[in-house]
Image (tube, grey):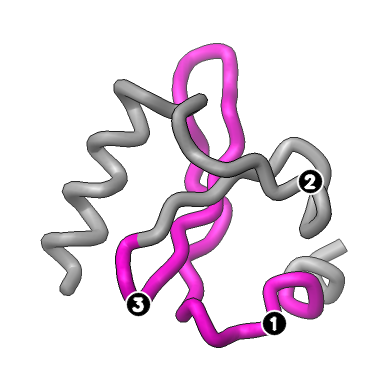
Amino acid sequence: MLREIAQTGEHLANRALMWRARDEVAPGLRSVLSHPYVIFYRLKPDGVEIARVLHERRNFSEVFKKER
């Protein structure tokens, strides 16, 4: 499972704009599915910043609201 998440993270570096924008969760946030996990990330001038990796059944809005 960790290997699959790591591989998905590597793909992010090359195609970061390809996946879903998640502004409804937090401004500037994007996500990609690595079943059963969702990798949340932000675009940075020098690459991609992984914000969180959460199970797909979590309430994403609640998790990110607690971080603000």
At which x and y percent is residue 1? 17, 73
> Which of 18/68 is in front?
18
Sequence-wise, the earlier of marks 3 and 2 is: 2
Q: Is residue 47 left or right of residue 12?
A: right
Sequence-wise, the earlier of marks 3 and 1 is: 3
Say the numbered circle drawn on residue 36.
3
Q: Residues within 10 Å of mark 3 (few under 14, many from 20)?
A: few
| Quadrant assignment, res 11 | top left
In the picture of the structure, the residue carrying the numbered disc 2 is: 23
At which x and y percent is residue 60? 69, 73
Q: In this view, does 25 lie to the left or right of 20?
A: right
Q: In this view, does 1 lie to the left or right of 55?
A: left
> At 21% from the left edge and 53% from the top edge, which residue is drawn?
6
> Which region of the structure is painted magenta?
34-63
The residues bearing labels 1 and 2 have C-alpha atoms spaced at a distance of 15 Å
**Residue at the bottom extreme, as displayed:** 57
In the picture of the structure, the residue carrying the numbered disc 1 is: 59
> At 80% from the left edge and 52% from the top edge, which residue is drawn?
26
At which x and y percent is residue 19? 49, 38
Which residue type does callout 2 highlight? Asp
CB within 8 Å, label 1 to label 2: no
Sequence-wise, the earlier of marks 1 and 2 is: 2
At which x and y percent is residue 25? 78, 58
The residues bearing labels 3 and 1 have C-alpha atoms spaced at a distance of 14 Å
Q: In this view, does 33 lie above or below 36?
A: above
Looking at the rendered structure, the secondary structure element under dot 2 is loop
The residues bearing labels 3 and 2 have C-alpha atoms spaced at a distance of 21 Å
56 magenta-colored: yes
